[in-house]
Amino acid sequence: MSMNDGTSSTSASVSNSSGNNTADNYSDDYDVYDYHYEYTWSFEEEKNNILSRLEHDYDSQRRPYMTSGVSDNVTVGITIDTFSDISITNMDFTVGIYLLQSWREPRLASADRHSQPIFLTFGEIFSKAWMPDLYFLKEKKAKRHSITYPNVMLQINPDGRMVYSQRLSLTIGCQYNFLRFPMDTQFCKIQMSSYAYTVESLQLLWDEKEPIRFSKSDLNFPEFELVDIETDSGLILDKRGNYSVLTVNVLFSRDLRPYLLNVYIPSIVVVFLAFMSMWIDPRAVPARVTIGVITVLTTMTQSVNTQQGLPKVSYVKAVDVWLATCLVFVVGAMFEYALVNVMIQRLDDRKDRGEIVDVKPALNSISPLSSDAKYLASTPKQIYWNPAKVDSIGRALFFLCFALFNIIYWTVYLSLSMEDRKPQK
């Protein structure tokens, strides 16, 4: 009997426990549902209230603090997404950014400061709110992205702080300097300012925590290397007044390696080919003339091809100095052979007239004039300058001059290039 009572009691206890858990769970679920319902209702009510104020009781032509007579402070932050194109011929570059603007709007502040922020998208009437008239200086083309939906968002916080975010692609002009091309470092600016409001009405400020964001490893260019990105602020002086301006300074340098492979090394080979012609027998006229003409035409073709991808400028570039000097050397090699050929013709004329001359032993072991020497006899009139000696001196002089030019050229321009890489304002 006692066992039955015990069993019965235990079963009742388990049954009561299960019943209590079920009731508690139901009560918790009801509380969560009730809280979510109240939160959703409060959020929608607040949003409808703000939309109603924007629609009826709000003047978007008046800035927030116009009645108080103080300037509105607009905080700006930028995230650089891509540098998609750096155009040398058009003198501009294309950049993709996320632009974030923040300001205070007391007319849209909520009485309940503990409520949640309101987010308005492009399809709603957020365009009826006052917004800073920000524009980009030297902007050639701009686009606001709209795939798959317009990439804009307006956040209205309970304390009246407005946050306006949008994704843009900008093509901005930059005055490139090709004085040290292709060892140049370019300094470009992304500048933002208010179009209508002077500094007395609107002040642009950088975000104090993180004014600009970018990942240096993600910003890769086919021909350039990103050196540094810095921010600056100041004023633009205009006839209408002074305007607040924010500046992003972008410093990037050109990669020299493609030009070493496509311009400098080939031109060095051409110059050495012109030097090699001085080892050929001066009487092999077709061979030496052909090499001279080919080297001159090749150097001129390199110069034309290099200039095709660059805008026409009035100053001399570093690559112009290099190619012009190479052209001087290959043309000088042709003039050297012209001198040697004239000397040979004069020797032949004297031999034909029966004049007796004395030719000193040739310094050129490869092409000595021993075939001519057997026709010549000793005489008081001696010839100290003969074709072989001129070729020998020309080989040494041309090589030393070209080596000296390389030392000066690379020392000067590389040092200037390293100096240009330093950040500048």
Image (cartoon, rainbow, N blue to C red):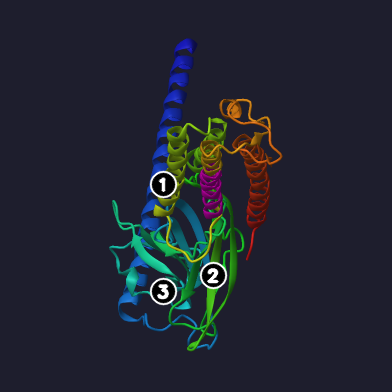
Considering the image in quadrants, where does the C terminus appear? bottom right
Q: Nearer the viewer, residue 263 or 230?
A: 263
The residues tagged by marks 2 and 1 sit, at their Cα atoms, a distance apart of 45 Å
The residues tagged by marks 1 and 3 sit, at their Cα atoms, a distance apart of 56 Å
Q: Main secondary structure of the magenta part?
A: helix
Q: Nearer the viewer, residue 52 or 305?
A: 305
- The residue carrying mark 1 is 301
- Alpha-carbon neighbours of circle 3 within 10 Å: few (<14), some, or many (≥20)? many
Q: Nearer the viewer, residue 88 or 212?
A: 88
- Alpha-carbon neighbours of circle 2 within 10 Å: few (<14), some, or many (≥20)? many
The residues tagged by marks 2 and 3 sit, at their Cα atoms, a distance apart of 17 Å
- Alpha-carbon neighbours of circle 1 within 10 Å: few (<14), some, or many (≥20)? few
Q: Residue at x 48, y 35 (%)?
A: 288
Mark 3 secondary-structure assignment: loop
Lower sequence index among marks 1 and 3:
3
Mark 1 secondary-structure assignment: helix
Which quadrant holds residue 137? bottom left
Q: Residue at x 50, y 63 (%)?
A: 114
Give residue 31's position: percent from left, percent from top.
Answer: 42, 48
Above or below — where is 309 with respect to 256? below
- The residue carrying mark 3 is 131
Q: Residue at x 57, y 31 (%)?
A: 279
Above or below — where is 321 with respect to 292? below
Lower sequence index among marks 2 and 1:
2
Lower sequence index among marks 2 and 3:
3
Task: Count up the numbered dots.
Answer: 3
The answer to whether any part of residue 222 appears in the image is: no
- The residue carrying mark 2 is 246
Give residue 388's position: percent from left, percent from top.
Answer: 61, 34
The magenta stretch spans residue 322: yes
